[in-house]
Image (tube, coloured by chain):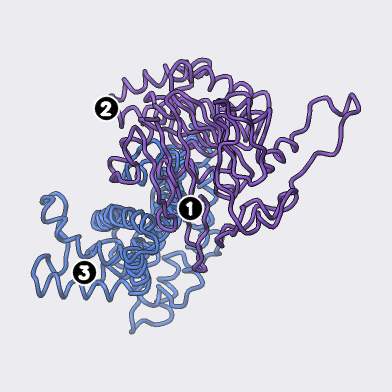
Chain colours: A blue, B purple
Amino acid sequence: MFAYIIRRCLATIPVMAIVALFVFSLLYIAPGDPAAVIAGDQATPADVERIRASLGLDRPFLVRFGEWVFRIIQGDLGVSIFTNLPVTRMIAQRIEPTLSLMVVTLILAVTIAVPMGVIAAWKSGSWIDRAVMGFAVLGFSVPVFVVGYLLAYWFALELDWFPVQGYTPFERGFGPWISNLVLPAIALGGVYIALIARITRATMLEVLQQDYIRTARAKGANQATMLFVHALKNAAVPIVTVIGIGVALLIGGAVVTESVFAIPGLGRLTVDAILRRDYPVIQGVILMFSFVYVLVNLLIDLSYTLFDPRIRY
Amino acid sequence: MALLEVENLQTHFRTPDGGVNRAVDGLSFNVEAGQTVAIVGESGCGKSVTSMSILRLIPEPPGQIAGQIRFNGKNLLDLSDREMRAIRGNEISMIFQEPMTSLNPVLSIGKQIGEALRLHQGLSRSQAEAKAVEMLTLVGIPAPDKRVKEYPHQLSGGMRQRVMIAIALACNPKLLIADEPTTALDVTIQAQILDLMRDLKHRVGAAIVLITHDLGVVAEVAERVIVMYAGRKVEEARVEDLFRAPKHPYTQGLLGAVPKLGSSLDGTSERLAEIPGLVPSLKQKLQGCVFASRCPQVTELCRTAAPALEEKAPAHIAACHYAVKEAVPA
């Protein structure tokens, strides 16, 4: 088990290296010249050249990549071209809202989607099943920003249950913090809920056909025990896998959701950085998101052993 | 009053094309307390459906159970789901054919044995585990206090069937339904499991309904035998009488299809007698005798009139127009 964790952690190194290379070259080949942006509209070609040299942009690709990686390993993501602040500090300032949004969405989605899928499988073919699956299709097909604006309109403007937008730090209390996150989490969670509910239903349908479910019934187990103890634990591995894969949806969706609800998180930071061609910030944020994704999926892999005793690392 | 009285049991399934499959059609039999009754027949004759019907494990719909299944005098078909759950695994329990797939792969052995105890006897987690160890000892599993924490994949097929028996007997049921308990096991393990069942039967005092197609198993453990064909009972007798003097041509055919050990060595081996043809489709109502299409002695009468179950010898009934009636001593 321990050896496996070490192996998996080591295996993330090449993954992260490829991500790093990709991130670095993506901006290298992207149109637009940061030196020209910084220099402004009035600059002469000589000014632009000087700024380019001061940023090191005139040196060969591999040299710059090597230096960049070397600094990242030391925990230095560089300095923002626009604000002149260290990228690590900018990320640290913005990470709480994004992390809060993702965690709340994750918890909300799992607690809604898993029982939904279980009940749809149990009542398969009934109107409950069709309603759940219809909802899932809706969740897949309506974009985050549409749901976001609709929610904000109804529950914030019309009913006044939640704030329209913004973010309250957790240190100011759980109530204000969560009330600012409910609507964004629902908006962001739509696709995620749909995905988890569908996979839960499909897996449960298969598990409910198994002989050991009949054994449980023959023992006199009630419906809830059968579904949630005997069946769900057997269905857990695919469900948890999809939950892990779906974190990518959350990362992508967070960017849009934060814009809709004016949450000052990493998503907004990313959008702003892209608009300003603030290369170090873009690189830093993407690297961090990739790292989180790889880490989450490592944890998911390790969690399999909790659900299925046949899996041993 | 017998422990279990099945009267005119009809388990039908609606098929997707709108037809009805009469898997069990008008079956009646009794099981006395402590008695072992075997139900034999070919695949598809309704044995398993009968056993599942008794515990009401048939999904309804598409299944539909009619008739009466009286256990200790009360009709199980009238009970609510909750009342039925209180009987399952407690007063009536069941062992299934497939030990490899009948245990939940993600729950420990101890938990699975303890579950019935916790449900029906309200034992605590630790009491249930202690009792599970006791049950594992009873069914002859070595190192039970270690095994109780293991999972099904760590056990062999024979061991798993022992665990299934431990689960079934945990609450001291009055009736044990064993649906082909040895079919999936190899021969030496089969013998062990049969010995175990016989031994435990005496200790626990449960009645057993043994579903099987293996006549060797029947001869080993049963006291009475019911022969089923196409969803109906065609013969019922004490086990010695059935093997000595089978009345129904179907039973005679079944017995003729059993190879004799050693017959190829002493030169007496012949081609095994087989029953030609297949079990008729149960989708249409059959006219006349159910066995008419395969019976070697079929006559016009068989094709038109269904024979009733008659006592052909003391405590020996069969449904055949031509079965020889032995003199019933007055």
Is residue B289 or residue A170 the one in the foreground?
B289
* Chain of residue at mark 3: A
Residue carrying label 1: A206
Q: Are marks 2 and 3 on the same chain?
A: no
Image: B317 above or below A135: above
- At mark 2, the secondary structure is loop
Image: B14 above or below B248: below
Q: Nearer the viewer, mark 2 or mark 3?
A: 2
The answer to which image quadrant residue B191 occupies is top right
Residue sticking out furthest to the front: B330
Residue at (89%, 25%) from the top-left corner? Answer: B265
- At mark 3, the secondary structure is loop
Residue at (58%, 53%) from the top-left corner? Answer: B306
The answer to which image quadrant residue A104 occupies is bottom left
Evaluate if marks 2 and 1 touch, with contact meaning CB atoms under 8 Å apart.
no
Q: Are marks 1 and 3 on the same chain?
A: yes
Residue carrying label 3: A261
CA gap between label 2 and label 1 equals: 31 Å
Residue type beneath disc 3: Phe
Is residue A99 or residue A220 the one in the foreground?
A220
Count of residue discs: 3
Residue type beneath disc 2: Gly
10 Å neighbourhood of mark 2: few (<14), some, or many (≥20)?
Answer: few
| Residue B100 visible in the snapshot | no
Residue carrying label 2: B122
Question: Reading the chain from its start, which is encountered first: label 1 or label 3?
Answer: 1
- At mark 1, the secondary structure is helix
